[in-house]
Amino acid sequence: MHTEQLVEVILPGVVEPEGLQVRHGGTVPSPGPGQVVIRMEATGVSFAEQQMRRGRYFDQPPYPFVPGYDLVGTVTVTGAGVGPDLVGRRVAALVKVGGWASHVVVDAADAVAVPDRIGAAEAETLVLNGITAWQMLHRKARVRPGGTIVVHGANGGVGSVLVQLALATGITVIGTASPRHHDTLRAQGVSPLDYRAGDLAARVRQLAPGGVDAVFDHVGGRGIVDSWRMLAPGGTLVSYGTAATRDDQGSKQWPVLKLIGRLCWWNVLPNGRHASFFNVWAGRSLGKDRFRARLREDLAEVFAALQRGDITPRIAARLPLDRAADAVRLAESGTIAGKVVLTP
C-alpha cells in the first residue's frame, strides 16, 4: 500500500506562469511490467517548458499535461520483470514531459544510475543539459583538442556545460553572452563576446582569422547565417534550438522546418563545411536499445566529468514544486546563470 500522495504541476493550456496548476492528493502511480516508480528529488525548468507554456514546442502533447523534461530521484517500487535491487537507488531519467511530479513512472531501461557522491540537484542540472552538450561536442561536431569553437549563450544551461566540457578537452572557446556574464566567462578561460554588439561573425574572425571548427547555436532565426559565416573550411554548425522565435505567433513547426531546410541546403554546397540540427531524441532513429545504451554511456561520461572537477553544476535557484510559477518566471527572466531546480 502507498501511503504517500501524488503532487504534480499541470500545464492547462497557453497560460502565464501563474496559470500553472498544482494538484495535491492524487494516487501515486503503480509501475507496469518493466517499469519503476521514481520518487522525484529534483527536476528542472528548461527552455522546452518555456516553449510549451506558449504552445511553441515542436512536438508537445495536447493540453493539459504535466511538464518536466528530466528528473533525478530514488526508485521506490519496481514492476514485474525488474529486479528489486533497483529499489533505493538514485537514478536520472529523460522523459520530455511528466517530470514535474512527486512520483514518476518510467521504463526501467530509461533509468540511469547516478553515482552515490553526486547530489540530486547537482545531477539534475546535467541530465538534459549534459547529454545535449556531450553529444553535440563529441558525437556531432567531434572537435579535437587544440580546436576552436563558438558557444552561443555560453552562460546558459547547455552552454555552460558545453563550455566546461570543451575547456577540459583542450579546446579554445569563444562564448557569446550579455556583458554582465563576461567576467565569469573570462575567469574560466573563455573569450566573451556581446551577442548584441553587431557583426558577430566579423568579431569572431578577429579572434579566429581562419574561422572556427564548430559553432553551437540554440538561437536560430536570422542569426544562424552569422553562425555559418564563422566556420573554417571543414567546420561544423550544430543548431539545437529556435530561441529567437520563442515569442512568435503562428505555426510552432514552421520555424524549425525552415531552419532544418536551410541547414540541409548549406550541406549540399561544395565548401566542405557541415550543418546539422541536433535534438537528443533524434538518436531514437538508431533503435530504442542503441539509443538507451548511448544515453547511459554519455550520461556516465558527464557524471564522471563532474566527479573529476571538469564541470561545476550551475544551480541558479532551488524552489519547491508548488512554487513552479515562480521557478518559471525566474528561468525566463534572463537574469540568472545556470538552471532553476524544482524539489518536492
Image (spheres, rainbow, N blue to C red):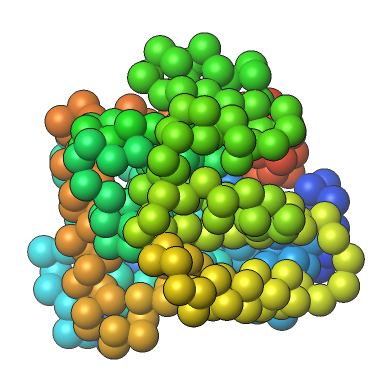
Between 207 and 1, the one lying in front of the other is 207
Please tell me which residue is depicted at 29% across the width and 84% down the height of the picture.
Answer: 286
Apparent side of residue 19 relative to residue 179 in the rendered image (left or right):
right
Please provide percent x and percent y for residue 284: 36, 81
Quadrant assignment, res 310: top left
Quadrant assignment, res 261: bottom right
Q: Quadrant of the N terminus?
A: bottom left
Between 246 and 168, the one lying in front of the other is 168
Between 319 and 310, the one lying in front of the other is 310
Is residue 80 among what the camera can see?
Answer: yes
Apparent side of residue 68 relative to residue 251 in the rendered image (left or right):
left
194, above or below 26, in the image: above
Please provide percent x and percent y for residue 153: 56, 38
Please tell me which residue is depicted at 69% across the width and 36% down the height of the picture.
Answer: 199
Apparent side of residue 242 relative to residue 301 in the rendered image (left or right):
right
275, above or below 212, in the image: below
Quadrant assignment, res 128: bottom left
Apparent side of residue 339 relative to residue 75 in the rendered image (left or right):
right
Please tell me which residue is depicted at 46% across the width and 59% down the height of the picture.
Answer: 238
Is residue 3 among what the camera can see?
Answer: no
Please tell me which residue is depicted at 42% across the width and 63% down the height of the picture.
Answer: 273
Please provide percent x and percent y for residue 30: 39, 76
Please provide percent x and percent y for residue 109: 24, 74
**Labels in figure, total:** 0
Of all residues, the one furthest to the right in this rendering is 249
263, above or below 317, in the image: below
